[in-house]
Image: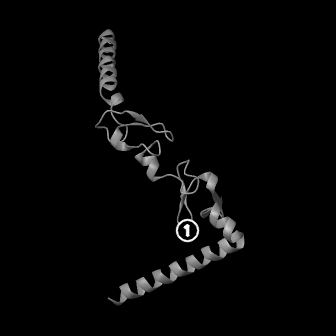
Amino acid sequence: MNENKENYVKKLSFIIDDILANNIEKKCEICGKKERKNKCRICGREVCNDCYNKEKGMCIVCSETLCEICKRRNAVERCQICGKLVCPDCMVRIDKSRVVCKDCYEKLGLDGVRRIIKDKAISENLKMKKFFQEFCEK
């Protein structure tokens, strides 16, 4: 009986390998529909022509999440001042939860950045307070 299980597992393994080799591996890694023909220079995904930005040499996912400063790496954060998407190399961490792009940091300096972030936080708090007051009046 144990031998039957082993044979079954082997046959199943061959079937799965065949399916993967003939279907999944040749399909676009983003849409999963068309044949992949291009490789993204950023993430290495293999994608179809529709999911590839030929001008940039990258897939549409990386193209939409590209650092807006260096335009070479995927962004991981958004600048607290200008809102640009930035990669780790193009950002300055102000504290545990806030980052700014290196451009804003160079223009404003640490004190200017902290002042603007503080002013934005106060402004957001006032907007929320006003919203809740109006909401409660209804």
Foreground of the two, 96 or 92? 92
**In the image, 105: left or right of 83?**
right
**In the image, 57: left or right of 107?**
left
Q: Quadrant of the N terminus?
A: top left
**Looking at the image, residue 24 lies above or below residue 51:** above
- Which residue is painted at 41% across and 83% down in the image? 131
Foreground of the two, 9 or 77? 77
Callout 1 crowding tier (Cα within 10 Å): few <14, some 14–19, many ≥20: few
Image mark count: 1
In the image, residue 112 lies at what x, y percent?
Answer: 68, 74
* Rendered image coloring scheme: one colour
**Looking at the image, residue 40 lies above or below residue 67:** above
- Which residue is painted at 42% across and 42% down in the image? 54
In the image, residue 73 lies at what x, y percent?
Answer: 55, 48
**Looking at the image, residue 97 lies above or below residue 132:** above
**In the image, 108: left or right of 66?**
right
In the image, residue 110 lies at what x, y percent?
Answer: 71, 69
Which residue ends up furthest to the front in the rendered image?
55
Q: Quadrant of the C terminus?
A: bottom left
- Which residue is painted at 50% across and 84% down in the image? 126
Foreground of the two, 103 or 18? 103
- Which quarter of the picture shows residue 22? top left
Which residue ends up furthest to the bottom in the rendered image?
137
**Looking at the image, residue 84 lies above or below residue 7:** below
- Which quarter of the picture shows residue 53? top left
Element under disc 1: loop
In the image, residue 63 lies at what x, y percent?
Answer: 45, 49
Foreground of the two, 54 or 36? 54
Q: Which residue is mark 1?
A: 82
- Which residue is painted at 67% across and 69% down in the image? 107
Q: Amino acid at mark 1?
A: Cys
